[in-house]
Image (tube, helix red, strand yellow):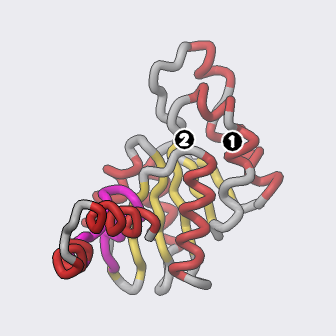
Amino acid sequence: VLDALAAIIVARHLGIADAAIIRALSKFTGAKRRFEVLGEKGDITFVDDYGHHPTEIRAMLDSARDYFGDRRLLVVFQPHQFSRTRLLLEGFAHSFSKADQLLVAPILPVRDSAEERQAISSEDLVAAINKVSDNAKAFASFAKITDYLKLKLRAGDVVLSLGAGKNSEWIQDFYNHFG
């Protein structure tokens, strides 16, 4: 909404007619990987989002909770970088409280040293989150997350993929082959 208001202000400042602004906004479907609703299958909604920083995650889950109400939110998160996960551990621990379940994939290594890779794990992240929210579970792979969700999903659920890594590929594939 804030981005749309900013676009309206800029367009009006440039002298663009209100009708043209309304037409343009009515065609805008949103930014890719920002609360991108992939679709619904079997009364289950699938959403992909790039959020990978605690502040983004908190804002996304606040929005998801507002948008989906009391529907069960199952969040699949892939931490991005071992160093970032370690340095922002406390922020991450407090970011996921609005999720009903948090399924944590292995950390995606990016420019991380061997030392950094040994300093923290997805299991460490889950332990920190569970001290705050008690809603997280670590998985060894996306395949294990898929298996888990196939057993646990029910009508009305929302599967929300968060992260800057392989999670987007995973949710696209999961959505395309679900059902």
18 with respect to 76 (left or right): left
Residue ID for mark 1: 125
Residue located at (52% from left, 81% from top): 68
Residue located at (77% from left, 54% from top): 130
24 with respect to 170 (left or right): left
Residue ID for mark 2: 79
- Looking at the rendered image, the quarter that the N terminus falls into is bottom left
Three-letter code for the amino acid on which mark 1 is drawn: Leu
Residue 13: where, in percent of width, then height? Answer: 30, 62
- Looking at the rendered image, the quarter that the C terminus falls into is bottom left
Residue 131: where, in percent of width, then height? Answer: 82, 52
Q: Can residue 88 be seen by looking at this rendering?
A: yes
Q: Nearer the viewer, residue 98 or 125?
A: 98
Q: Which range is magenta?
A: 26-40
Three-letter code for the amino acid on which mark 2 is drawn: Pro
Kindly indicate the quadrant of the structure image that contains residue 146. bottom left
Q: Secondary structure at mark 2?
A: loop
11 with respect to 66 (left or right): left
**Does 126 lie within the magenta span?**
no
Question: Looking at the picture, does residue 23 appear above or below residue 63?
Answer: below
The 10 Å Cα crowd at callout 2, few under 14, some 14 to 19, many 20 or more, is many
Residue 8: where, in percent of width, then height? Answer: 33, 69
Q: Nearer the viewer, residue 61 or 147?
A: 61
Q: Are marks 2 and 1 in contact (CB under 8 Å)?
A: yes
